[in-house]
Amino acid sequence: MSVDKNKAVINYLLQCQDIYNSPLYFNLIDATNNTIQILTTTEDKALSKPFVDGSVQKRYTFNLITFKSISDMELVKPMGTSISTDEYPNENVDELFAVQQLLDWVLEQDDLANYPDFGSDCIIDSIDTTTDYPRFDGINTEITPPLAMYSISIVIEYLDISKVIYNKQ
């Protein structure tokens, strides 16, 4: 049975409270504070590895893009005291940490073997990010407040068994 993998990924991501509680878009950029975008990417067909039994190893890749307000405030460096970012918070540090938590949630789901439902014809091997930290993609200073754009690339590796011709029982 064919499953819409895009809908499966959306439903999967909505399990994350931070994503569920934020405006979420699919293949559309809405550059406003705290929005999250799911952007699909294409894969080279050469990545699909066919096996003798007719199954095919495949990859589904997408990016999570999020916009966060950003400040031009310098980091506080109090004279004669120890520096603590807990005592002297910085919006930019805090916002990057919030995006890092999205990335960490994806990695935790892989550890728990909690995957999107690609249907009975697909066996998901893993869901992973391509980096350990979110990518900082730039700042839009033409709007108020200025927004930083961060992205996380996510890869789902799976086995498509829809055309298996041999099944040893």
Image (spheres, grey):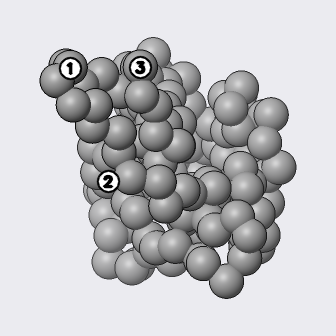
The answer to whether any part of residue 158 appears in the image is: no
Label 2 Cα neighbours within 10 Å, binned few <14 / some 14-19 / many ≥20: few
Q: Is residue 7 above or below residue 21?
A: below
Count of numbered circles on the image: 3
Which residue shows up at 71% across the image and 50% down it? Answer: 34
Which residue is label 2 attached to? 130
Q: Which mark is residue 87?
A: 3
Mark 2 residue element: loop
| Mark 2 vs 3, N-terminal side | 3
Quarter-of-image position of residue 6: bottom right
Q: Earlier in the sequence, mark 3 or mark 1?
A: 1
Task: From the viewer's perspective, tell me whether residue 70 is left or right of residue 132.
Answer: right
Q: Quadrant of the C terminus?
A: top left
**Residue at screen point 41% across, 19% down:** 87
Left or right of residue 130, residue 82 in this image = left
In the rendered structure, are the residues bearing label 1 and label 2 in contact, judged by CB atoms less than 8 Å apart? no
User: For residue 95, which numbered disc appears in the image?
Assistant: none
Dividing the picture into quarters, in which one does residue 93 lie? top left
Which residue type carries mark 2?
Thr
Residue type indicated by callout 3: Glu
Q: Nearer the viewer, mark 2 or mark 3?
A: 3
46 horizontally vs 3: left or right: left
The residue that label 1 is drawn on is 81
- Of badges 3 and 1, the one in the foreground is 1
Percent position of residue 78, x then y:
28, 31
Element on which disc 3 rests: loop
Find out whether the residues at labels 2 and 3 contact each other: C-beta distance under 8 Å: no
Mark 3 surroundings within 10 Å by alpha-carbon count, few (fewer than 14), some (14 through 19), many (20 or more): few
Seen from the viewer's position, the closer of residues 81 and 52 is 81
Look at the numbered disc 1 and give the secondary structure of its residue: loop
Disc 2 versus disc 3: distance between alpha carbons?
A: 33 Å
Compared with residue 156, is residue 42 higher up or lower down, i.e. above or below? Answer: below
